[in-house]
Image (tube, rainbow, N blue to C red):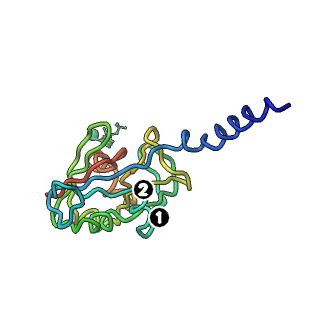
Amino acid sequence: MQWRAPAFFAFLAALLMLPLAVRAAPFELEMQGKIGKTNDPSHTVYRISEAELLKLPAHTIVTSTRWTPKSTFTGPLFTDVLQLAEARGDSVELRTFDDYSVTLTVSEARHYGAILAYSMNGKRLKVRDFGPLFLIFPRDAYPSELTGAVADTKYVWQVKALILK
Ligand SMILES: Nc1nc2c(c(=O)[nH]1)N[C@H]1C(S)=C(S)[C@@H](COP(=O)(O)O)O[C@H]1N2
Ligand SMILES: [Mo]
């Protein structure tokens, strides 16, 4: 019977480590450009950890988008994220993991209360379903302003960096 013990403990160890392997690595959001605060050795970038982003007050927008049915999106206000690095620019370029880029004004994001959503219907967004961060506007509340070809360019998923201009 004694030979079973090592096998049992190896099995137990593998079982305990499983969540570590399955869990996605924490994401980071990078801010650059006209920012007042940096946290990297070159003093040009402010890296926001996932933990720091999750600590910001969570806001909710219930809306459909062109890609998703009516859903509850949760995340910090986009303007609260900008404040983490003391952003000064009037406009901000969003860059994504799929190399898309669009530039918005900070005032339009503030006006509509856009959020950087990390979850949809209570589930964290994965990179393959618009995660880790999806810029959401209250489209259903302002259909004439927030639908159409120009507005569509502003719903940005897979956000990885914000460049203040
Ligand atoms: N991450 C990411 N977000 C994005 C895009 C993209 O290519 N990647 N395209 C933008 C543009 S230009 C528009 S019009 C719509 C495109 O959506 P579609 O690819 O479903 O047509 O999403 C916007 N958000
Ligand atoms: Mo587009």
Which numbered disc flags the more N-terminal residue, 2 or 1?
Answer: 1
| 75 sits to left or right of 113 | right
| 16 sits to left or right of 90 | right
Choose mark 2 or mark 1, whichever is in front: 2
Between 163 and 13, the one lying in front of the other is: 13
The verdict on label 2 being within 8 Å of ligand 1 is: no
Residue 60 is marked as: 1
Q: Are marks 2 and 1 in contact (CB under 8 Å)?
A: no
Between 151 and 120, the one lying in front of the other is: 120
Q: Quadrant of ligand 2?
A: top left
Q: Residues within 10 Å of mark 1 (few under 14, many from 20)?
A: some
In the rendered image, the quadrant that contains the C terminus is: bottom left
Q: CA distance from mark 2 to mark 1?
A: 8 Å
> Residue at the spot x=33%, y=62% of the render?
78
Q: Amino acid at mark 2?
A: Ala
- Label 2's element? strand
Residue 98 is marked as: none
Q: Residues within 10 Å of mark 2 (few under 14, many from 20)?
A: many
> Residue at the spot x=32%, y=40% of the render?
97
Residue 117 is marked as: 2
The image quadrant of residue 57 is bottom left
Residue 5 location, x and y as percent? 77, 35
> Residue at the spot x=82%, y=32% of the render?
2
In the displayed structure, 48 sits above or below 125; it is below
Residue 53 location, x and y as percent? 39, 61
- Residue that extends furthest to the right in the rendered view of this protein: 1
> Residue at the spot x=86%, y=31% of the render?
1
The image quadrant of residue 107 is bottom left
| 113 sits to left or right of 69 | left
Residue 93 location, x and y as percent? 21, 51
Q: Amino acid at mark 1?
A: Thr
